[in-house]
Image (cartoon, rainbow, N blue to C red):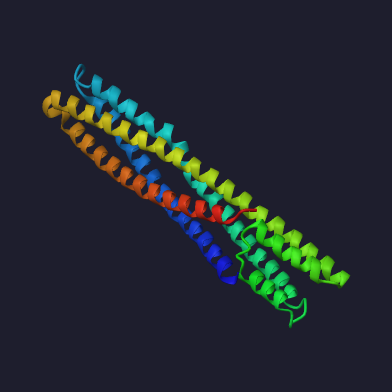
Amino acid sequence: MIQALIDYNRDMNRVFGTCVRIQGTARHLGDSNLEIELLARNGVAEAARLPEGKGRSLLVLAEVLSELPDQIRPDVDNIESLCERLARNTADCSNVVRLYYQLVSSLLKTASQLGEPTDGATRRTKEHLQSQSYLSGGDLEGLESFLSTKDTIATRSRSSSMLNERCRENLGRIGDRLSESEHILCEVFDRIRSILTFGRTARYLAQNIAIEAAAIGPDGANFTNLSRTIHDVVDQLEKNLSALRQSADKGEGLLESLRRRVAA
């Protein structure tokens, strides 16, 4: 029982570590978003200075590009806030697991003192109870049943019953927190997809800027450089998104494993 709950809490802490990594990567996404916005604004200013007739297409492309960061900023900011919620959830869940461990340990200690030491059936039942993971309601039922049939002291029996009820409440709370965490992580995946679409759109606009820049000759040199720089920024953005997705996938796997082990 001890090792099962220790392992469970260790995996819970791994989810917390995943949250921290996602938050760190999300901040890099914000940096890339701001960089694209500044580059696009510079492009708008450069296009406005071109001779009439040459910069119209570039001006329109740069203006569209400059508007994209504002549209995606809520998703970037939302990833950080979602991860803060996920981290709080995970920390709370870890605290509940520790409390649950203490409660179950107390009940098992009481169970070890009940029954005749020479009774082979009782001894085997105690050994069985000690070997359970207590990550399911069924395990608690077995312990509760043993305590209710073997404990003849009314005060101690009532105390055990109250502890059992608290165990059930905590086990249910763990399950609720895990379900909520999975829902939060689904929202993170939605934001990742939105930001990935933003990156593809920015890259497409940068390609069109390069085409228009080539068409106007030497006057388009700055825009060729602008297009190249935006491509570099989007490359970094997609690299960060890939790292974020890997961390989120890992968190999803851990949460799924934790939830499967809890059958309240």
Q: Is residue 131 above or below residue 167?
A: below
From what the image shows, is residue 126 above or below residue 95? below
Which of the pair 71/173 is nearer the observer? 173
Name, please, the residue furthest toward the top. 53
Q: Is residue 78 visible?
A: no
Q: Position of residue 169 (x, y in %)?
A: 71, 55
- The mark total stands at 0
Q: Is residue 182 rendered to the left or right of residue 130?
A: left
The answer to which image quadrant residue 56 occupies is: top left
Which is nearer the eye, 57 or 87?
87
Figure check: 158 above or below 79: below
Quarter of the image that includes the N terminus: bottom right
Q: Which residue is drawn at 19% across and 24% down?
A: 212
Residue furthest toward the right? 154
Residue placed at 50% from the left, 54% from the top? 257
Q: Residue furthest bottom?
A: 118
The residue at 38%/50% (across/down) is 246
* Image spot of residue 12 (x, y percent): 53, 59
Residue 202: image quadrant is top left
Q: Is residue 192 left or right of residue 171?
A: left
Question: Can see residue 15?
Answer: yes
Residue 12 as seen in the image, left or right of residue 200: right
**Nearest to the observer: residue 38 or residue 105:** 105
Most extreme residue toward the front is: 120
Residue 96 picture location, percent across and down:
64, 60
Where's residue 98, x and y in %? 63, 65
Q: Residue 203: which quarter of the image?
A: top left
Residue at left 52%, top 65%? Answer: 10
